[in-house]
Amino acid sequence: MRELVLHCREAQAEALSDALLEAGALSVSVEDADEGTADERPLFGEPGTEPDVQAWDRNHVVALLPDGVDPAQLLVAALDYAGLDSSLGQDWSLRDVPDADWVRLTQSQFGPIEISEKLWIIPSWHKVADPHAAPEGEHAQSGAGPAYMAPDVVRIELDPGLAFGTGSHPTTHLCLAWLEADMPAGATLLDYGCGSGILAIPARKLGAGATLAVDIDPQAVQSAADNAAANRVELSAMLPDGLPEGSFEVVVANILSNPLKVLAPMLAGRVAPGGHLVLSGVLERQAEEVAAAYAPWISMSVWRAREGWVCLHGRRV
């Protein structure tokens, strides 16, 4: 990815930032152009108040660009939208942004995550013994060492890459708890919005049958496939247009409430008669409206709540 860097004065920074977002920038930040020099100055107000000014005397306005976008065209559109002098568009530059830098930095904060006594998510950046190898030596037999190395624990080695899903979010815990507690053995399963494979892979290890993992992001599809291979489980990862016809005994979708409502006819239609639908990414205050979206097909109710989020479950008649 690339960033477009522009130079402007304080009075132009806010309007230019808004215009760049309107023209298609993914995000915009304002930096002090004098940072690291004798002219650098702080920008803040009293505690609990807004600063008197929203930018510095001299600023770098930094816009993150979508792949394939012509920065010159985006800049022309932004200046025109904001009614700003076209001369602003003469002083700009591009800089590359490594796609994975911020992801890896965030990932480094996460250690092994206990979903339950029997299920752990182990980030790939934590070196652990081969989960398929038998315990060795007095240390293993005595039960000493990390709890996730106990021989009867289901361990999921996970590297999200650029996909969503480290296992740390309450909605992920809720879905995994349902899979561990209530998923029928051997059930066929569709994970819609699979991200890193954080639900599909544990489902297979917990006894699911044929499993399909679907995401609209090609990087997520690749991440799910790579993580499945690392965990020695079989699943099919694909984009939505690759999803074959058919229904599943379990359909799980951990997305957000608005997409879940839009997808209601499709997701409900993928649940086999007698099958289960499990939804999360839903705040407690959103539960009723999401359930209402599925009411024509499946009666949904709150299965469990965690930290303000809920997991909805229903069974197709």
Image (cartoon, rainbow, N blue to C red):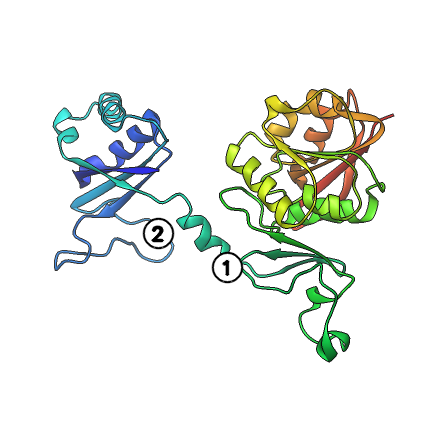
Quadrant location of the C terminus in the rendered image: top right
Identify residue type, mark 1: Gln
* Neighbourhood count class around disc 2 (C-alpha, 10 Å): few under 14, some 14–19, many 20 upward: few
Of the numbered discs 1 and 2, the one sitting upstream in the chain is 2
- Image point (83%, 44%), residue name: 182
- Image point (79%, 38%), residue name: 209
Quadrant location of the N terminus in the rendered image: top left
Occupied quadrant, residue 139: bottom right
- Image point (35%, 52%), residue name: 49
Q: Secondary structure at mark 1?
A: loop
- Image point (85%, 42%), residue name: 185
Percent position (x, y) of residue 194?
62, 37
Occupied quadrant, residue 44: bottom left
> Label 2 belongs to which residue?
49
Q: Secondary structure at mark 2?
A: loop
The relative height of residue 109 versus residue 22 in the rendered view (above or below) is below
* Neighbourhood count class around disc 1 (C-alpha, 10 Å): few under 14, some 14–19, many 20 upward: few
Occupied quadrant, residue 240: top right
Residue 308 is at least partly visible in this image: no
Percent position (x, y) of residue 48?
38, 54
CA gap, disc 1 and disc 2: 31 Å
Camera-nearest label, 1 or 2: 1
Tell which of 177 and 70 is nearer to you. 70
Q: Is 232 left or right of 296, judged from the image as shown?
A: left
> Label 1 belongs to which residue?
109
Identify residue type, mark 2: Thr
Residue 245 is at least partly visible in this image: yes
Tell which of 277 and 206 is nearer to you. 206
Q: Is 244 left or right of 123, judged from the image as shown?
A: right
Percent position (x, y) of residue 8?
17, 38
The relative height of residue 97 versus residue 273 in the rendered view (above or below) is below
Q: Is 232 left or right of 183, judged from the image as shown?
A: left
